Image (tube, helix red, strand yellow):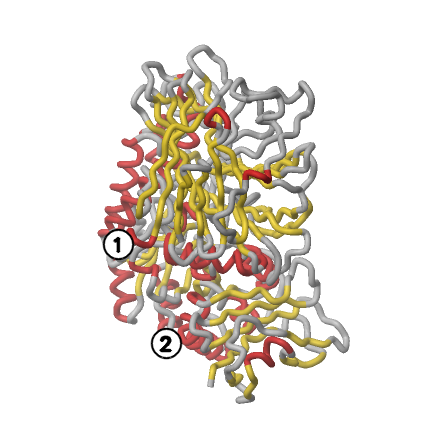
Amino acid sequence: MQITYNENRKTFKIDTENSSYVMIVRKGGHLQHMYYGAYVGDDDLEYMFSDVINESFTPWPPCAEDSHFALDTQPQEYPCNGTGDYRISAFSLEMPCGNSATSLKYVSHEIFSGKKKLSGLPATYVEDEADAVTLEIKMRDELACADVILSYSVIKGYDAIMRHTRVLNSGKAPFFIEKAYSCCVDFNEKDYDIIHFYGTWAAERQMERKPVIQGISEIASKRGSSSHNHNPFIVLCDHMATEDFGSVYGFALCYSGNFSAKVEVDTFDQTRVIMGINPEDFKWKLSPGEEFTSPEAIMVYSSNGIGGMSRQYHKIIRKHICRGKYRDIRRPILINNWEATYFEFTTEKLYAIADAAAPLGIEMLVLDDGWFATRNDDKTSIGDWIVNENKLQGGLKALSDKLTSLNMKLGLWFEPEIVSFDSDLYRAHPDWVLHVEGRDRSIGRYTAVLDLSRKEVEDYVFEAVSKILRSADISYVKWDFNRNLTEVGSKALPCDQQKEVFHRYVLGVYSLAERLTSTFPDILFEGCSGGGGRFDCGMFYYFPQIWTSDDTDAFERCKIQYGSSVGYPASVMSAHVSASPNHQTFREMPFKTRGDVATSGAFGYELDLSIISEEEKEMVKAQVERYKELYDTIVNGDNYRLIDPFTNNRWCAWEYVSEDKSQAVLTYVVTRFKVKGRYHIKLKGLDPDATYREKVSGRCYKGNTLMNVGINLGNDLHEAHSDIVVFDKV
């Protein structure tokens, strides 16, 4: 891990554990990209530049010695709009004259130990400054008097580069930022596939892989959140790259709002990748002396395939994004009442669920939607955070006392960013919601979105939620967000700043989350947005786990959790055992299979434990005990994806291996019956010379045998058959 500058060559070289990233200050102060990939030595790479042109259609800058240096055909480090590079650009300013032609030139740089905290934004962090090195390159647009700081950080032990951009107005007149992407990388070839994760409500992070194309591809959201539909994480990889082999580049944005990831292949077969805030509906006024900071992008390179990249992200998220008490300790195993009761719960019913759960080893009851104001359906009361004691006799204090007597904790559902049209809060402050004067207000679940870009609105929500959290012994909060943004305007901002509202809203969400999690550090906060509609590194900074999807069907969860695992660790994926038939798909599924799939995440239950059979209660008890026993390997171990449910229609499988390779946990699920099917599987990531004992049969295998020969799981496994097979080093 080091960052160096070669004064003679004018080159910057960023080295991670196994990768290198090289830039050069070239003609006229243009900062150009040279290389990103597997580690290379300190060689002069300028010979790789080819000064190709497209005749007069690729204009060259005045600094060029001849017409062969054209920005449009050269790899750029942070390309600008309107001054000769016609490809997708990372940065653009609108100056007081109304023009957007932007040009950045190198001014200076600084290399230092440590990593600065981003102002108002989540980002990776280190606890010891010696564990990180940062490079800041100062660029300048002289005409606009705009200073742009390109920041690059590396953390010891990882093949990751963290990037963001700061823009400072050092002039005497305001200008407008039209776009400020967080990162850009130019590759000198087009032989790549792109992997991205699309979906919808209850079907998040479905994996798609396809070759990059001539022209522009974009993965984006303009919904006000990162969304169910697309995820702010993409992968660029060799055509032949697999889970274990090939060059792979990951790009993850630490942001929870509108994002854009674009990939362009130009006419010279060069590939450009940019990622950052979506410039659609974005325009930021920067007055003299003010500064704007972009979100952080986390880039990972792996020469060991997609799996090698994933395991880098898993460790970074667990150790350098997630924070607080629950980063390193086991999360409580919970029962959520939503699918057991929906809105129709009573105090007696909640007590019955708790009485059934406690003897089975479950540690927490989460009271979901419907505990406040007059909330008996989804049409009213969100924003009125006052306990409905007609429905919940004795209030939250009585319920928490009951749970304490059972050695259980209480969790509570909130939707802090939302207000029902039928609520006292909306009637008192209709102007507190995002809206455009004169426009009708769109309705989503009978609600509007609170304007958290306004400090007084944020303060109200903070105080209302805090009052509830102080009223009883509450140990967990499920923070939901069941609405995308429409009519995005704020009464608090002037006309020329209305396109700042999308981003200011996200900053308000982050500020509120920071205040609540800091004020209540012993509470476990779980994120949710109709399931996984805001499942991103930005939210993990505040919430160490997120409800992965509202779809709890075990077959569907195989794909959802498998796709999520390409970028995100099991520790952040809440996964629950729900009822059969499933409430979303109506599919019947064995209790064992539901438990096996849910074990690969932050484990819990989402059904009425008071009415299940005695046999199923014994299964719950066994599942709880098994999860506690395997927790460290599943949550902190290395994840290996073995059989892909997106391309294999018969079965899928995945594995966790403890950091010291002393234990392997294999999970498989048969999704489609095949007569006389053969089910053999090879494990990965073991100590090849060690001996491993399979926990149930007691049979011993060499690590290299398990990885190279594999195991025989039997023939004719029936549909919905599953198992968790544990191997311990002898």
Amino acid at dot 1: Pro
Secondary structure of residue under mark 2: helix
Judging by the rendered image, the residue that carries numbered circle 1 is 521
- Is the residue marked by circle 1 packed among few (<14), some (14-19), or many (20+) residues within 10 Å? some
In-image side of 560 versus 212 (left or right): left
Amino acid at dot 2: Pro
Residue at coordinates 39% horizontally, 64% vertically from top-left?
Answer: 334
In-image side of 354 versus 595 (left or right): left
In-image side of 204 versus 112 (left or right): right
Give the x, y percent position of residue 704.
Answer: 58, 79
Point out the tag, 2 or 1, that comes first from the N-terminus: 2
* Between marks 2 and 1 in the image, the one whose residue lies nearer the viewer: 1
Q: Quadrant of residue 215?
A: top right
**Residue 504 visible in image:** no
Judging by the rendered image, the residue that carries numbered circle 2 is 359
Residue at coordinates 46% horizontally, 86% vertically from top-left?
Answer: 730
**Residue 47 visible in image:** yes
Out of 96 and 624, give the one closest to the viewer.
Answer: 96
User: Is residue 555 placed above or below 104 in the rendered structure?
Assistant: below
C-alpha span from label 2 to label 1: 28 Å
User: Is residue 224 placed above or below 392 in the rendered structure?
Assistant: above
Secondary structure of residue under mark 1: loop
Out of 214 and 713, give the one closest to the viewer.
Answer: 214
